[in-house]
Image: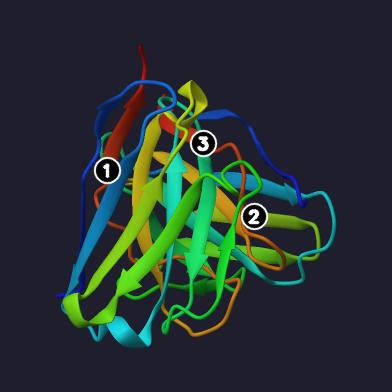
């Protein structure tokens, strides 16, 4: 089983600032990594797949990078609608998710 | 537009059974692989089960193997999850989700809104 970890658990950011979220896999997952956004009471929404490809309709302020075991989701300028929990998911093997990073307002 | 709507959740006693349904619309359901994913209250996401487009290939997470059964009816554009021998730790919101590319494993998109299953005496 591939274990995913995310840091930090909570990230406090002011609107307009840059947010950088990290995701680490316990073994290499190549570029088989997705990112999701989840707001309270809603289902997760796909943001990024293939580690760096934005899903349809996702704003350009969201970008993903990394490969192997280290990945990063960057939100270049946080908007009010971006405050949410973000999960990474590997699909190199049986799917597994990270515990999430909550991005809240500073 | 693509839509997935789950139903069938509720309160059930430990050891009991429940059948979840997921109604798909806005896309050719029979072309898509599908999965169930769950989220315990206040917790993260856990993949539960997968079924191929024809239903010929099925996988389960170890935590539910032998107790849950995934199935689909392509004529009815519906996905199902039969849950037996339910335990308190099965309490969660259950989401159905599709896989956009016919490749397993893969990312999940889109997701339904979820249905809550509570296992408690």
Q: CA distance from mark 3 to mark 1?
A: 13 Å
Q: CA distance from mark 1 to mark 2?
A: 23 Å
Measured as percent of width and height from the top left, residue B119 is found at 37, 23
Measured as percent of width and height from the top left, residue A71 is found at 69, 57
For the residues tagged 1 and 2, is the chain the same? yes
Q: In this view, which residue lies farthest toward the right?
A: A27
Q: Which quadrant holds residue B25?
A: bottom left
Other-residue count near label 3 (Cα within 10 Å), few / some / many at <14 / 14–19 / ≥20: some
Image mark for residue A59: none
Chain letter, disc 1 residue? A
Measured as percent of width and height from the top left, residue A21 is found at 59, 45
Q: Secondary structure at mark 2?
A: strand
Question: Mark 1 vs mark 2: which is more N-terminal?
Answer: 1
Residue wearing tag 1: A42
Mark 3 and mark 2 in contact? Answer it, CB < 8 Å: no
Disc 3 or disc 2, which is closer to the eye? 3
Which residue occupies 44% across, 38% down? B39
Front-most of residues B112 and A105 = B112
The C terminus of chain A is located in which quarter? top left
Q: Secondary structure at mark 1?
A: loop
Residue wearing tag 3: B44
Measured as percent of width and height from the top left, residue A26 is found at 82, 49
Image check: B24 left or right of A30?
left
Chain letter, disc 2 residue? A
Residue wearing tag 2: A72
- Looking at the image, residue B13 lies above or below residue A36: above
Q: Secondary structure at mark 3?
A: loop
For the residues tagged 3 and 2, is the chain the same? no
Front-most of residues B87 and A33 = B87
């Amino acid at each position: 089983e591939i274990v995913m970890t995310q840091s930090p658990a909570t990230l406090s950011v002011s609107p307009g600032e840059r947010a950088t979220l990290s995701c680490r896999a316990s073994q290499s997952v190549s570029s088989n990594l997705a990112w999701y956004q989840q707001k309270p009471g809603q289902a997760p929404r796909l943001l990024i797949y293939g580690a760096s490809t934005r899903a349809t309709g996702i704003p350009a302020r969201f970008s993903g990078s990394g490969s192997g075991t280290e990945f990063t989701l960057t939100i270049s300028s946080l908007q009010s609608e971006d405050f949410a929990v973000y999960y990474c998911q590997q699909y190199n093997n049986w799917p597994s998710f990270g515990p999430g990073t909550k991005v809240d307002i500073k | 537009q693509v839509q997935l709507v789950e139903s069938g959740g509720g309160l059930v006693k430990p050891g009991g059974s429940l059948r979840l349904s997921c109604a798909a619309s806005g896309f050719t359901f029979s072309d898509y692989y599908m999965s169930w994913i769950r989220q315990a209250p206040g917790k993260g996401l856990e993949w539960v089960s997968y079924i191929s487009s024809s239903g010929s290939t099925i996988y389960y997470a170890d935590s539910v193997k032998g107790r849950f059964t995934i199935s689909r009816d392509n004529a009815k554009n519906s996905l199902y999850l039969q849950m037996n021998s339910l335990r308190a730790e099965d309490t969660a919101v259950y989401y159905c989700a599709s896989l956009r590319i016919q490749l397993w494993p893969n990312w999940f998109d889109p997701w339904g809104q979820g249905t809550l299953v509570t296992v408690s005496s």
